[in-house]
Amino acid sequence: MQKIKSLMTRQGLKSPQDSVHDLSPVENFRLPSKEEQREFREQAIDPEAEQEIINSIEEVYFSSDSLDIVQYELEKLPPVLSLQEIEEYRDKLKRQQAAVSKKVADLILEKQPSYVKELERVTSLQTSLQLAAVICSNGRRHLNTAKEGFTEASLGLLANQRKRQLLIGLLKSLRTIKTLQRTDVRLSEMLEEEDYPGAIQLCLECQKAASTFKHYSCISDLNSKLQDTLEQIEEQLDVALSKICKNFDVAHYTKVQQAYRLLGKTQTAMDQLHMHFTQAIHNTVFQVVLGYVELCAGNTDTKFQKLPYKDLCMHITSDSYIPCLTDLCKALWEVMLSYFCTMQWHEKNDQEEPQAASDSISANEENNFDRSYVKKKLEHGLTRIWQDVQLKVKTYLLGTDMSNFKYDDFIVVLDIISRLMQVGEEFCGSKSEVLQESIRKQSVNYFKNYHRTRLEELRMFLENETWELCPVKSSFSIIQLHEFKCLNQSRSPSMSPSKQVSATDSTTMSLFDQYISEGNPFEIQSSMKEDETEDVLTSNGYESDELEKSAYQEYDSDSDVPEELKRDYVDEQTGDAPSKSVSRETLRSRKRSDYSLNKMNAPILTNTTLNVIRLVGRYMQMMTILKPIAFDVIHCMSQLFDYYLYAVYTFFGRNDAYESTGLGLSSSRLRTTLNRIQESLIDLEVSGENSGSLAPSEERKEKVPSPHLSQLVILTSSNTLYGLAQRVVATESLVFLAEQFESLQAHLDSVMPSAKKPFLQQFYSQTVSTASELRKPIYWIVAAKAIDYEQLLVLMANVKWDVKEIMSQHNVYVDALLKEFEQFNKKLAELSKHVRIPLPVSNILWEHCIRLANRTLVEGYANVKKCSNEGRALMQLDYQQFLMKLEKLTDIRPIPDKEFVETYIKAYYLTENDMERWIKEHREYSTKQLTNLVNVCLGSHINKKARQKLLAAIDDMDRPKR
């Protein structure tokens, strides 16, 4: 079949009949005749049989190779030919040929419609090709006509016009290039004018224009030149940005930010800005310190410039320390103020930018991201910059030993650092732990040395103190001393940051708001010194001449005393003065409260007291600023008070003879306080009171030798009432000092750490409150010597008490005792002209004298060997006379120990049983006094047996005391 198909292809498209006739002779087998074909058609051949016939054809007939069939068949003939076999074989081939022919004819008939259709398409294509050939011929003919219709001149005009247009464009490009080449001159002018946004805008436009003409060879050089110019602008922009760190200018910074925004480097600008601020802090502090070091060195040696900052700080001298610190803080303030202004600028700019935001969503997102980055960077930079400032100032602070600084200088340092910490708190909310720790170290070191020196100085003051009155005005208050300005002036330089903030709450103005336009918070240190004046002293101890002239008129004059108060009438039955007289005396006592009304109750204090008060004020200044060492400062303040109290006691109150009287002159609390002070503060070894156990050297450093009273102070003269003026000044100055400490308790409690507040409470309850208790032992010594009690005993011993009749006249010893009191009263009045004697002091003096007189009277009565009932009545008469006269001399009511005398006198009349009970109930009398009472009563109403019983009871009472 493949052979047949290939033959059909080579012969072309012909009808099946033509195709059959066109077969070559070789390939054309003998076709059946018409008769044979008819016979074949008539024969009904089964398709399956026909297919079997086709299948029986040898493969070689279907081969595509060129094969000579005749030759093939001839070669197949056997050597011996047989006609019958040949014919049979021939018939077989005919049948096969007939089957193939029939099959081919059927296939041709089956495909004839497709053949016809394809033949029509070929015919149509041939027609179209012929039409195209005609169109092409016509086109060629028209082209030839057009070519012949135009001349070369017309074409030349067109070419020249095109060339002209090209040359015009070229000229415009050349002019643009020339302008670009001259741009560098304008850029330089704009940079000199600091018009950075305009310069960058111009440079970017030039770069954009240059990219349009990049096909010119000269533009490549111009492009590189513009790029170099842009880099130069960025460098100058960075320099301009660095200037912001020390002197912020809104217009200047606005230009710089606009320039960076044009470059698309807003974030880079912020990173660079923080780097410049860090560098500015380093360079600023180094240059300030270097300037002072070179100034102090007095030469221009460059060796200091090569030193690290830490080593450079160690070369600062004490004289230049504070000026250098002040300039250092001023310079750092300028840097922080610039940063503060920078943040304000960005906050304001962020509020205005959204109103003029771009319509582009991507541009808005980029701007929002940049603003967020800048905001976070600035907020983070606050802490970083303040930390750098703290570290630089800390290095400066610790570079010098300030333990030997003057107090005022050290306070100035504390003021400056306190103000700097306030700046830090307002700058970034920092508590300035680095600064606090560094100043705490210096303060502890300084304060220990300072306090030790002040204690030694206080000892020297006390040993040279003559206890003369320091004349101060009656309106004197510690607030008037400049050391206590911090308590009543909200803008004191020595105020802590928290107090400064509270003081400015009313105006709601922070330091940055106050000094944003001009000034510097660290300039206040020098100006405040000028206002530190005091007006607390008087010229002659009096506020005016009129007061001095009328000082004692009221007390000396007795004209206003009613006559009934001068009467000598005494109710001998009761021993009391008339009640009317008592009330008048009470009115009189209210009118004449003490011995020195003229001085308007001016405080009694000495120069040493004033010095201690000033020290307390200085300590409080230091404590207010340095709250971390508040406990150490308050402890040292308590030592100042302890030492002053101990000195007053040892100078004027220590007397073992009077301590043994058992009168309770010193309370147990006072004795405990004095013992504590002696153990903790007094160096007994140096004082010559070696206790046997020496304290370690470190512990002894905290102690001070006991002071010694100045030899100029005489306490043994009766004319001066045994130094009563000095005793009053000393004791009352201590009481005044205690009152000042009481007034400061609330303030001290506010700064004392909670864990240490029990110490403060104990100090006030056990030490400060005992100051007034020193009056008793100190004034007791005066009272014991001012009246001649021994002479009284001698006079009483000469009196005969076993009289037989009732006497109407009192004894001489009463007048002698009253005369002693009158002399005492005159001496007090004379003394009060020089030193005001407060009412509590006069009361205590009179109380002591009266108590001693009463006890002396009892002792005198106890010395009586014989006494009758009339003698006891005489005793009562004497005592009532004494009381009546005494009440005119003193305002004290009731009379101290009055019952002590009266009860002893009346005990003579008791029966045996009553006396035994009375003896057991009255343990205030001595054994001698009780024994004498029993012996005197013997024979009158007590027998010997009762006497032995009563003496045994007395002995039983006395046994526990032994």
Image (cartoon, grey):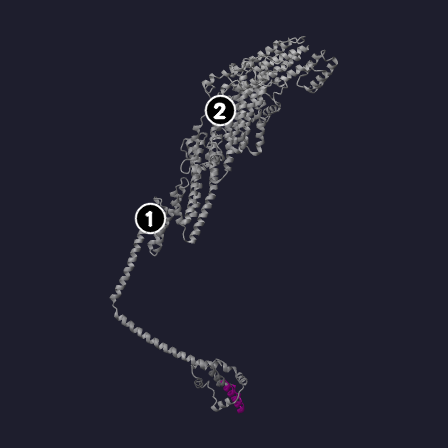
Return the x and y of residue 276 as percentages of the image width and height: 43, 42
Of residues 648 and 298, which is closer to you in this image? 648
Return the x and y of residue 777 as percentages of the image width and height: 59, 19
At mark 2, the secondary structure is loop
Determine the image quadrant of residue 780: top right
Number of residues whose C-alpha sits closer than 10 Å to that of mark 2, classed few (under 14), some (14–19) or many (20 or more): some
* In magenta segment, residue 770: no
Looking at the image, is 57 positioned above or below residue 376? below
The residue wearing badge 2 is 476
* In magenta segment, residue 96: yes
Three-letter code, disc 1: Asp
Residue occupying image coordinates x 43% and y 51%: 364
Three-letter code, disc 2: Phe
Looking at the image, is 589 positioned above or below residue 442? above
At mark 1, the secondary structure is helix
What range of the chain is rendered magenta? 76-100
Of residues 450 and 64, which is closer to you in this image? 450
Return the x and y of residue 233 as percentages of the image width and height: 37, 47
Residue 434, can we see it? Answer: yes
| 2 or 1: tag closer to the N-terminus | 1
Return the x and y of residue 813 as percentages of the image width and height: 61, 10
Foreground tag (2 vs 1) = 2
Main SS category, magenta section: helix
Determine the image quadrant of residue 281: top left
- Mark identifier at residue 184: 1
